[in-house]
Structure formats: structure tokens, C-alpha cells
Amino acid sequence: MFMNIVITILSGIALLVVAFIFTVTLEGIARKIEARIQRRYGPPFWQNFIDIFKSLTKYSISHGFIFDFGILMALGGTIATVFFIPAGSLAVFPGIDNVFVVIYLLAIGLLGMAMSAVGSGNPNASIGIGRALAQMLGYELPFMIVILGVFFHHGTSSLSDLVSIQIAQGAYNVWLMPIGGVVAFVSLIGMLGKKPFDTFIAPAEIASGPLVEYSGKYLGMLMIQHAFATFIEIGLFVNLFLGGGRTLWEFLLKFLIVYFSIVIISATIPRFRVEQAIKFYWKWPLILSFVQVIIVVFVMGRR
Amino acid sequence: MSNEHKAWERVANMLRSRSLWMLYYCTGCGAIELPPTMTSRFDMERLGIGPMATPRQADILLITGYLSTKTLRRVIYSYEQMQSPKYIVGFGSCTLNGGIYYDSYATINKLDLYVPVDLYLAGCMPRPEAIVSGFTALMSKIDKGEANGWKEYQEKNDWFKRNQIEALGEVYVHDEFHE
């Protein structure tokens, strides 16, 4: 019993360290890839570590209690969510890592961020948060419908169970439900706030939106939170549709492929306006997700 | 200053010199030299220098060309919104001594009287090569802990404020949002 608790704590810490180092390194390499697409040389791949730790050495200004509390809520909520993402063999809570737990805990982080940004009193932050929440309505709907089809087919909503089922049957969900996989991938781009759907951070329009009033240590904490959120969202996609991994390395390799394909897409496509993004999500991805669910329910049935 | 504190400052300075986020204040001329500096020809990002949208997040305030007295007020507000450590780069001869506008009634001649400038990029206009070499000079200055304009602004605040008021008549933060 005691041994189990120690193992859970140690694997939780290991997962956090792996998630942080791996995601921030990938973000650095992504900047390099984007630079090469634009025929630039690009920063070194450890640039994002320097950015984060430099931000933590700076002085910073607070805008009141809600501003401080929201940041802690965002960082804490996101770190709590990371524990429920099984990374190959490194699963902290095998068996109880339900997708609904992940979605509810992730909402705590997002709402903390929204509360904190609105607490700063800057109108650009309020516009950015309004856009972020509107876009969330856009991508959550097709994504949820598709993953409900996945739960119906496999009869479970536990991430590690879904991973072991996919590995056992030898076919990933993205082969079984290709339309659903595409819809979830498009939703994932919006979830990460990458280029066609980055209207809520738009630096040239609304001065980087929710981040407008954050300085120094606050910005550093938000960059760490962003790294963990990226890990959660892509990890969710990899576990649900690409069969997670037998080992940690297999999981990280799939993560890398998904992340870099999103980076390459986002480096070549310009930005949608917010109402265009929501119209897009509520048109084609929503229709395709319904088509996929109808196929799953009436053709494929329960496994 | 204790040894431990010094070691921490050295690490912090090293980090600060390799990641510089810049806020452009391009109301004068010279903004046209920045796109080639940022894009593929000279690629500023390989030095860790990138554009930032707001004063809160920025480390460098880059002031290009001449400053009219009206825009000086905005420069001071932006500079005071930035968080320490913060650096000002004066770009072009006009920030040094007035340049070709030295006898104009509407511009200020020496930027150094109103805000502490850490680095001047002289020339009319300085080409991207000059900008990149200037920034590498600023980076080594920060690394050695010599770019102390922000400390100077705190220590000699009375002197800076007196000069600002002499040029502008009054300097106060006008909070339009909460009125």
C-alpha cells in the first residue's frame, strides 16, 4: 500500500518533468521549423527554455487578488490534468484516467486563465477571452461528438483502457473511424490556438489578447501552463486515436509527429476571423462528426 | 553584495541577454529598416530577439527617429509600464542630437535627458547590419551587467522628471479606462 503511493508520486513527478522538457523542446524546434519554412535560420532549439527562465527572473506587476489567484488556478488546474494523461508505459492513475475527468479538470485551468485575464481590467484581454471562449464552443462540439462515438464503439471512456484495447486489436481508432480522426485533428488545431484558429491571441490586432497585461513572472508561469496544456491536448488525441504507446518512447514519437504536422500546417495558413472560425467548425467538422457517429452507431455497432 | 547574490545575478543576466523581446516605437522614420532585420535576410530571431505586442511583456523599447514632444509623453508612459530590467535603444541620429531636426520647435533633441538610453544606433538611417551589430553589443553589455538604465531611472528619477516636465509642461498618467 505504502509502496503504491510512493510509486504513484514518483511517476507523477516523472510525468511532469517529461511533459515539461519534451513539450518546451518541441516548441523550440517548432520555431526552428517555422523559420526554415520562411527561409530564415531560426533561434536555437533551447530558446524557449531561455524565454521561460528569463521571464521568471524579471520583476512583475500585479493587478489585484483575482489576477494572482486566476494564474495559480490555471497553472494548478493544468498540472493536475497532466497526471491523468497516460504517456505510454508511464501512467500515473491507470484505470481511473477517464476522459471526462480530463475535460473537467482542463476547464478549471482555462477558466482560471479567463478569470485572471478579465481581472486585469484591460479591454484587449476581455476581447481575447471572449474570442477564446467563443472558439471553445466551436471546436468542443464536433470533438465531443466524435469521441462519444469512440466511447460507444469501445464501451469505455477510460484512456488507459482505450489504449490497451487499440493495441490489443492492432488497429488504431484513426483507421477504424478516419472521418472522426480528421475532425478531431482539425479540432485539435483550434484547441492549441495554432495558426488558422489563433484569433484570440492575434498580436497585431488585440495585442496578444488574454496575455496583454502579464509581465515577468506571471508570463513565465503562463508559458509553463501553455506547455502543459499542449501536452494534455495532443496527448489526448494520441491516446484516443493513435493508440497511445506500449512504451514511453512510442508515445513521444507519435506526439512529435502530430505536433510537427500541426506546426507545418499552421506555418502556411493565414488566420481566420473569429466568426469565420466558428462558422467553419459548426459547418464541415460538425456535419462530418455526425456522419461518423451515424456510421459508428448503425454500421459498426458495439465492439 | 554577497557572493551568492552575485552568482544569481550573473545567471539572470546571461538569460536576459539571450532572450530580448522588443516593443517598437516607430512614430518617427526608420521603421522600414526593421522588416529586413526581422525577416529572412538578417533574421533577428536567431539571436533570441523577437517582437512583442505590449509594454508589459517587452524588455527593449526601440525608439526610431525623431520624437515630437507629443509622442515623448507616450514614450514615457510606455516606458513606465514596462517591467524592470528594461532597456531603451535609440535608433537613428535624431535620438542622439536631433539630427536634421535639430532646430525644430516640435521635436526633442536629446532623448537621454528624458529617459535612460542604454544603446544608440547612430546613422541616418542605420542599415540592418548596423542594427544587428548594435544588438549584439547590447547583448554583451547586458551579459556583463552594464546595461543599468533602469536602475539609473529609479535613482535619478527627480532629475528625469524635472527634464520631462520642462519639455512637456506636465506628466501624469491619465487613466482613461477607469474614469
Image (spheres, coloured by chain):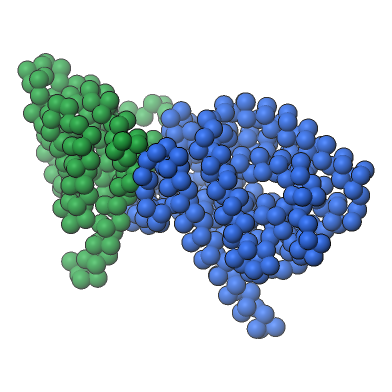
> In the figure, the blue chain has which letter?
A
Q: Residue at x 21, y 66 (%)?
A: B6
Percent of width and height locating residue B137: 17, 47
The answer to whether residue B170 is seen in the rendering is no
Query: Of residues A23 and B64, which is closer to you in this image?
Result: A23
Q: Residue at x 78, y 32 (%)?
A: A287
The answer to whether residue A62 is seen in the rendering is yes
Horizontally, residue B28 falls left or right of residue A177, namely left
Give the drawing colour for chain B.
green
Q: Residue at x 86, y 45 (%)?
A: A296
Image quadrant in which you'd find residue B10? bottom left
Query: Of residues A26 and A139, which is closer to you in this image?
Result: A26
Image quadrant in which you'd find residue A204? top left
Q: Quadrant of the N terminus of chain A?
A: bottom right
Q: Residue at x 66, y 41 (%)?
A: A187
Image quadrant in which you'd find residue A245? bottom right
User: In the rendered image of this protein, does residue B104 appear above or below residue A64?
Assistant: above
Query: Of residues B82 and A86, which is closer to you in this image?
Result: A86
User: In the rendered image of this protein, does residue A190 appear above or below residue B1?
Assistant: above
Q: Quadrant of the C terminus of chain A?
A: bottom right
Report how many numbered discs are placed on residues in the image.
0
Horizontally, residue A171 falls left or right of residue A206, namely right
Percent of width and height locating residue A272: 57, 28
User: In the rendered image of this protein, does residue B92 appear above or below residue A267?
Assistant: above
Query: Of residues A182 and A56, which is closer to you in this image?
Result: A182
Q: Residue furthest bottom?
A: A2
Percent of width and height locating residue A99: 73, 55
Horizontally, residue B96 falls left or right of residue A195, namely left
User: In the rendered image of this protein, does residue A131 appear above or below residue A235?
Assistant: above
Percent of width and height locating residue A144: 75, 44
